[in-house]
Amino acid sequence: MKKIRVLNVDDSALMRQVLASLLAKDQEIEVVGSAPDPYIAREKIKALNPDVITLDVEMPRMDGITFLEKLMRGHPMPVVMVSSLTEAGCQTTLRALELGAVDFITKPKIDLREGMDEVAQDLIAKIKVAASARVRPLLVKREASESETKYASRNTLHGSSSAMIKTTDTIIAIGSSTGGTEAVKDVLEVLPPNTPPVLITQHMPERFTKTWADRMNGLCRISVKEAEDGDSVLPGHALVAPGGYHMALERSGARYTVRINQDPPVNRHRPSVDVLFASVARYAGANAVGVILTGMGGDGAKELLTMKQAGAFTIAQDEASCVVFGMPKEAIKAGAVDKVLPLGDIAGAILAHVGYSKAA
């Protein structure tokens, strides 16, 4: 079996040593080298041709984000960021994901050796996923599909006319994991202000979800926020499951709300996409759209099928546009999907299904 060749880039000699020691324990990974800064990393990439890079954010001479941007423009390859849990660290990590990093791990604040031991399995899993992920050059931007262009331009002309979308009792539920921060953004950016309510479960640690939601809120025409227990589910609003918490839909009469809890992980995840989809199947039934996007594993497949059986319209992202074709693949195999679509066509399909009016 060909081993995954990893280059660790970090200005801390201790961190480079810890990473090398942890990764050496896995028989499928070979640490081929390390670099204390991006300039040396650039030369080692040419000499060693690694499959995956782990990249620190804060380094001398050139920061990790600047290096990542240069790398993705000239020599795109799988990168796993090594980040901090500070607010600035969250913002920087999300920028790295925008630029094309596949995933990230968080550095412990104290006791580096013991703290990294705790995240070792997560790091190893993410490196293995990154090795097979689809990484595209930064300059290659996704072109809007014909359906997206049509819907977006019509909304620009007609503002938030109530004739555009029938919002009664419709819930849009979206689940994603690796690569999902950008995929979800691509879908939400197209949606007009009076889109039916959107509920999102993205596998992400605590604190990152709020930063991500706030970031999307500034980019989208719908309102996006990290969900709080008891929040109302309203047209023109998207709620994001908080990191470390499940989010479930509830209904009282005609009113929808969300419940946030710390029940045990499902499919090794909290938040879990299956938890969201199961609750939407139960309380919204046929008045729902279920969307499963890029991500590793099988979270969401089982309960997307429950949504479909309850009459919901279900969509999976296609393999060619996924960073990791794990979650959509499992949902397709389970028979849970009505349509398999490129990422650029998903927003248009949602709008068409919920009754976007061409005559608006």
Image: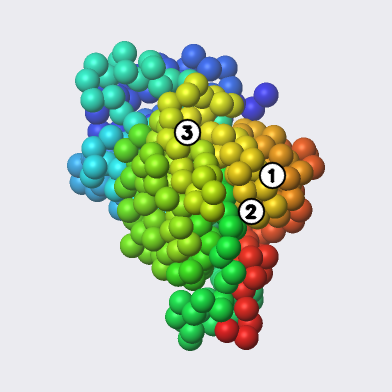
**Label 1–label 2 contact, CB within 8 A:** yes
Q: Real-space Cα distance between discs 1 and 3?
A: 18 Å
Q: Position of residue 58 (x, y in %)?
A: 24, 40
Q: Which residue is mark 1?
A: 307
Helix, strand or loop at mark 3: strand
Q: Give the amino acid at mark 3.
A: His
**Label 2: few (<14), some (14–19) or many (≥20) C-alpha neighbours in 10 Å:** many
Q: Is residue 107 above or below residue 99?
A: above
Q: Residue at x 57, y 71 (%)?
A: 165
**Label 1: few (<14), some (14–19) or many (≥20) C-alpha neighbours in 10 Å:** many
Q: Is residue 360 above or below residue 290?
A: below
The mark found on residue 246 in the picture is: 3
For residue 152, side relative to residue 218 (left or right): right
The mark found on residue 288 in the picture is: 2
* Sequence-earlier tag: 3 or 2: 3
**Label 3: few (<14), some (14–19) or many (≥20) C-alpha neighbours in 10 Å:** many
Image quadrant assignment for residue 283: top right
Q: Position of residue 17 (x, y in %)?
A: 33, 20
Image quadrant assignment for residue 348: bottom right
Q: Give the amino acid at mark 1.
A: Met
**Label 3–label 2 contact, CB within 8 A:** no
Q: Position of residue 334 (x, y in %)?
A: 77, 38
Q: Residue at x 56, y 31 (%)?
A: 128
For residue 28, side relative to residue 339 (left or right): left
The mark found on residue 66 in the picture is: none
Q: Nearer the viewer, residue 341 or 64?
A: 341
* Sequence-earlier tag: 1 or 2: 2
Q: Residue at x 39, y 56 (%)?
A: 224
Q: Real-space Cα distance between discs 3 and 2?
A: 19 Å
Q: Nearer the viewer, residue 264 or 57?
A: 264
